[in-house]
Amino acid sequence: AALLLLLPTACAGGDGAGGGSGRDAATPTAGVPGDIVVASGRDVTGKNGIRQRLIDAWNAEQEKAGTGYHARLVELPGNADEQRSQLLGALQSGSAAYDVVNLDVTWVPEFAAADLISPLPESLLDEDVIPAVASTARWRGEVYAAPFNSDVGLLYYRRDHLRQAGVERSDLTGGLDWPQLKRLIATLNDHKPPGYEKGWTTQLAGYEGRTVNAVEAFASAAGDGFALTDEDGRYDATVEELTEGITELRRRTEAATVLPGAFTSDEAASLGDFAAGRTAFLRHWPYVYPALHQSFPGDDRLGVTSLPGRAVLGGQNLAVTAGSPRATKATDLIRFLTGRQSERCLLDAGFAATRASAYTDDSVTCAVAAATPSAAPTGEGADTVPRDAAGRPRYARDVLLPALREAVHRPRTPLYGAFTQTFTTELGALFSENPPGDAELARRLDEALRRALPD
């Protein structure tokens, strides 16, 4: 299964066509007809995936209207950090002619604060955009991007493993908490299905996956008041709060419950362990839902439910680069790509849509040809995704939408790169052979974050 790594990008100057709030009064860049270049990471729905098909649909409209504009998708190589570096370098130097960029939600403040992206119309964030998702597109009161596809942590589980271990309740659709999950894992450990090793796996290698899992633990321990930074991106946690979060993370990663390989796993490795049957539970993102259902057709062996505790919000937002000579038309393109029908297309194809209507309004349909993809990231094979009567992935309305609405943010700061590197590095001590105590590790983490996120 492919890794959904979409890069940061920058948002362009000028207001968008179609109007917005009074704040949209900045002088628009009318530009001259030509190519609008969209920079993004690889589309996990495969070659000629849903993003390309949506761009093709917009191009068809432009050709019919004779506007002279044409959008072109450029997929950047490398992982998310490498893509972020490429985009920062390109936008700061002006060496790449990108008009629209697909920006990881954690990088919006950084690119906005660096003036690499410019404000966009308020109208792009109407009441249909899921509120938690919409907030990822703002920085200091301004709209700098439009949510394209979202993401949130989910819990996948093997129904067949649960039945083989004698668990009566093999359908966990209603959700469960961590104590309940641990009791299920204890039962599995006592009655191991063939090939089973440990209860659950996730992504704890020294990269963003560790940050995500730790933030989910910290947020679960803190409750509704969780925040490591204030609204201006300044660090404002206490040692006591950090200690509680570390204690929760330690509980979740006890040797009795987690697969040892999780400590060196990324998205692909953890998915492979789960598919191979070495665990019964997997914390992962929505985009693996189609791939897993290719391995486990139907609902008999595979299930998905909300993640116990709090789940982290991910996703990518579209922005117009500050140096775009076609800012107004680029904003028109973004409006099309993030509109109701486009979001329904993204949901049908396997992404988490950013608009509530994609999940709840049967009158909103996808008009793009072949919007329902094959289950394989390569674009091969038949669609095996269980779907509701309206053609959506069956879990979308009752599992995915509530998870998105209740998801928590990672710290929103222009110094997010410094935060996540520090957070990941310091928490690595928890998984060492001789880990420090929770309070001592919290003290070290607090000191390191204060150096990484100065006022």
Image (tube, rainbow, N blue to C red):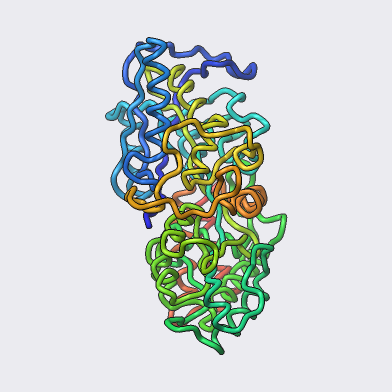
Q: Where in the figure is residue 14, as x and y percent of width and height? A: 48, 18
Residue occupying the far bottom of the picture: 190
Q: Is residue 357 visible?
A: yes
Q: Quadrant of residue 322?
A: top left
Quarter of the image that includes the N terminus: bottom left
Q: Quadrant of residue 250?
A: bottom right
Q: Is residue 436 visible?
A: no
Nearest the eye: 311 or 60: 60
Vertical position of residue 387 compared to residue 30: above or below: below
Q: Where in the figure is residue 22, as x and y percent of width and height? A: 64, 16
Nearest the eye: 150 or 27: 150
Q: Where in the figure is residue 425, as x and y percent of width and height? A: 44, 64
Left of 100 or right of it: where is 215?
A: right
Name which residue lies at 46% across and 17% down: 328
Name which residue lies at 45% across and 61% down: 292
Q: Where in the figure is residue 3, as x and y percent of width and height? A: 39, 54
Residue occupying the far right of the picture: 224
Vertical position of residue 352 compared to residue 63: above or below: below
Left of 225 or right of it: where is 426?
A: left
Name which residue lies at 63% across and 55% down: 399
Vertical position of residue 415 compared to residue 100: above or below: below
Nearest the eye: 21 or 166: 166
Nearest the eye: 315 or 236: 315
